[in-house]
């Protein structure tokens, strides 16, 4: 999905710079800027998800954390 957003953003900028009327240029420029933000957030979300820990811990892991022991032991 993020690659499709990137392609659509680049396409919007290409259309922006090839239009001759001000209204069409502004429209595609606006879509390109919105696409830049959406693409940046999509790539950041994938990176954050890849480095995040699992959301749930087992009962054993919770007990280890309460006792102040390392989970690696």
Image (cartoon, rainbow, N blue to C red):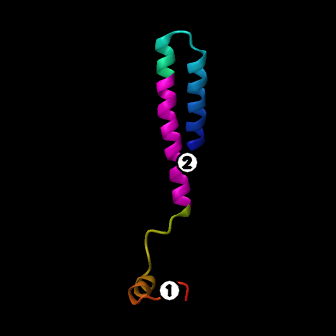
**Residue at horizontal 47 percent and vertical 19 percent from the top:** 26
Looking at the rendering, the stretch of residues picked out in magenta corresponds to: 29-50
> Would you name the residue on which mark 2 appears?
43
Q: Residue furthest top?
A: 21
The residue singled out by tag 1 in the image is 70
Q: Is residue 59 magenta?
A: no
Q: Element at badge 1?
A: loop
Q: Is 30 a magenta residue?
A: yes
Residue at x 47%, y 20% (from the top left corner): 27
Q: Is residue 6 above or below residue 49?
A: above
Sort mark 1 into few (<14), some (14-19) or many (20+) by Cα contacts within 10 Å.
few
Residue at position x 56%, y 60% in the image? 50
State the image coordinates of residue 11 (x, y, percent, origin top left): 60, 27
Q: Is residue 55 above or below residue 37?
A: below
Disc nearer the start of the sequence (2/1):
2
Q: Which is the main secondary structure of the residues drawn in magenta? A: helix
Q: Position of residue 7 (x, y in %)?
A: 61, 34
């Amino acid at each position: 999905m993020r690659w499709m957003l990137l392609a659509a953003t680049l396409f919007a900028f290409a259309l922006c710079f090839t239009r001759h009327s001000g209204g069409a240029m502004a429209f595609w420029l606006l879509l390109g800027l919105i696409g830049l933000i959406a693409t940046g957030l999509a790539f950041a979300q994938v990176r954050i998800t890849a480095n995040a820990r699992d959301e749930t811990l087992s009962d054993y892991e919770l007990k280890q954390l309460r006792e102040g022991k390392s989970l690696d032991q």
